[in-house]
Amino acid sequence: MSTFDPVRPAPRRLRRTALGISLAALVALPLAGEAAAAPAGSSSGSLESLGGSVGSGSWAGSAGSSDGGSVTAGSVIPGPLQNDHPPLPELRDDITTAAIVGEERKTEQLVRFTIASPALRREVGVEVALPRDNSVPRPSIYALEGVDAREETSGWVTIGGVPEFFADKDVNVVMINGGVSGLYTDWDRVDPGVGLHKWETFVTEELPPLLDTRLRTNGVKSLLGASMGAQGAMMLAHRHPEMFRGIAAFSGCYSTVDDLGRISVQSTVSSRGGDPANLWGEIGGPEWVAHDSVRNAEALRGKDIYVSVASGLPGRYEDPDASDWSDRVFIGGPIEFLANGCTHRLDAALRKLRIPATFDYEPLGVHAWSYWVDQLPKAWPTLARSLDLPA
């Protein structure tokens, strides 16, 4: 899923980009058919306790899920509507071993490491919110963010509330810098628009041993993600079930080969000039299926899972007198509506498999950081349980 930043005013071209993404999201509206709206309020506990039926009359219904090809090579968003493409990082051929090559203490509990990555062929920034007490080895949460993931810092640091919320908790929160439009996965080919993406290798193979050694962790790990990062986190969880014990995902899309999943992937990738043909081989082929968390939900069994999404309707942070009101309502609203449909499909898949999880459907709210900050305390009991920490 794509995000916009409601704190920093969006430049005109970024607004056109987000509008283009919203238009793609609106394509999903007819797919709901006669589907009912998301349940009002919040649902939590095991899936068996959530109530409701799976099938027709819900977002998960077969009437709203088609595998007919809606993803093509190239971009669904015309060039004039795309965001200004960020400069692509310069690739190097001299990095042969993953290593920490820089360390900057930004505050008492926030450090930024520079990691030399052979997979990404460059140096990557990683910020870590340190535990309140690191006198003994502590667990880690790997936090992933949205489509505009920046090279210099993480949105979880600047507007996502991680340093403040986790300041009194005994956990390392690892926040990856960079990866615009990359989905935190390994692409088959270098893309002319968005560059080289080998994030799955970086996050699961290169980074953990470096940080586990440097930070003296206990090796226990869970995942946190919002928007594109929610999809990436769920994907990493189902593809590496032995590595991650829990996951909290906010406002994501968790499929890749059904109608909603393909709309989400194509919009996320092409909004910054990327081509889905460079992603996982033949579009809709075996590797697309292998990255679909709904199709591979069985791999999530045994994990502590928290998933949240809002309805897309204006909520408490949408002030009609604010300068960003139209952006939040007409951009963030449709994107969150699409995420809502995606979330119901993951819910239905886990329910069918009788895999316990907590799903929180907020009746109001759009696709914006302010709502994800509010989700941190709601998700914490699930994450804490996965990490053997007190909530």
Image (spheres, rainbow, N blue to C red):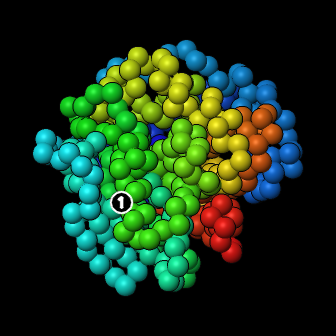
- Reply above or below: 52 against 321: above
> In the image, residue 266 lies at what x, y percent?
42, 30
Q: Is residue 243 left or right of residue 118?
A: right
> In the image, residue 26 lies at what x, y percent?
52, 34
- In the foreground, 51 or 30: 51
The quarter holding residue 120 reads top left
Q: Is residue 119 left or right of residue 220?
A: left
Provide the residue designation for mark 1: 210
Residue at the spot 38% in from the left edge and 42% down from the top edge? 201
> In the image, residue 245 lies at what x, y percent?
62, 54
- Reply above or below: 119 against 45: above
Element class at badge 1: helix
Can the viewer see residue 21? yes
Residue at the spot 77% in from the left edge and 48% down from the top edge? 356
- Reply above or below: 68 against 367: above
Residue at the spot 58% in from the left edge and 18% down from the top edge? 67
Identify the amino acid type marked 1. Answer: Leu
Residue at the spot 71% in from the left edge and 21% down from the top edge? 63
Count neighbours of disc 1 (C-alpha within 10 A) and say few if under 14, some if 14 to 19, many if 20 or more.
some
- In the foreground, 56 or 27: 56
Q: From the image, which quarter does the C terminus lie in? A: bottom right
Q: Is residue 241 left or right of residue 129?
A: right
- In the foreground, 119 or 187: 119
